[in-house]
Amino acid sequence: MAPNRKSKIVTQRWSRGFTLIELLVVILILSMLAGFAAPPIFKRLGKAKADLAKPRMAVIENALKQYELDCGQLPDDAEGGLEALLMSPPELEEKWAGPYLKQSQLLDPWGNPYLYVREGQYNPGSFDLISFGADGAEGGEGENADIAND
């Protein structure tokens, strides 16, 4: 039996692919789905970074305590602050047993350096470690809020 000519035309028509309108409709639907899904995802990403700041501070706190045990004091501004955890201050070379951290561990989740204050305001009688949040500036709310060690 010879194939029906009409069925051959229909088969060729469907095998050509999608029309421009069909592609535009699919792209429109995908962009609408992305528009609804993206904001909650980015909000969670910002919160995740803020939640990560505290554990990173704990690593620096432990390094500062080890430094204090080895050198008998916490680093001060004259010794370079947190940089004393990376390189020995000249006056403490024989006591210093570091490096206590890597350079990258002194950065908050947004890539900004932590602020170290030897005489703490958040922690009277101890030191403060502060991250200024996503904006890197003092103050702010939400993702831009300041985060201090406990």
Image: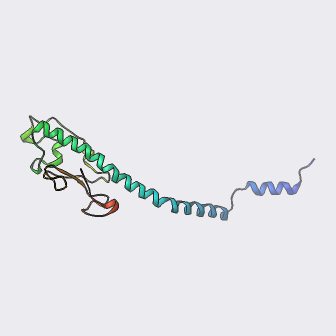
| Position in image of residue 145 (x %, y %) | 30, 60
* Residue drawn at x 66%, y 63% as measured from the top left: 20
Front residue (pair 51, 108): 51
Q: Quadrant of residue 132?
A: bottom left
| Position in image of residue 114 (x %, y %) | 23, 52
Residue 128 vertical placement versus 144 (above, below): above
Q: Image check: 82 left or right of 44?
A: left
* Residue drawn at x 26%, y 43% as measured from the top left: 59
Q: Quadrant of residue 58?
A: top left
Q: Residue furthest right?
A: 1
Residue 89 vertical placement versus 108 (above, below): above
- Colour setup of the view: rainbow
Front residue (pair 56, 123): 123
| Position in image of residue 67 (x %, y %) | 15, 39
Give the tally of numbered discs: 0
Q: Residue furthest left?
A: 91
* Residue drawn at x 26%, y 47% as measured from the top left: 57
Is residue 19 visible in this depiction of the protein? yes
| Position in image of residue 135 (x %, y %) | 30, 61
Front residue (pair 24, 5): 24
Front residue (pair 124, 91): 124
* Residue drawn at x 62%, y 60% as measured from the top left: 26
Is residue 86 visible in this depiction of the protein? no
Q: Image check: 29 left or right of 59?
A: right
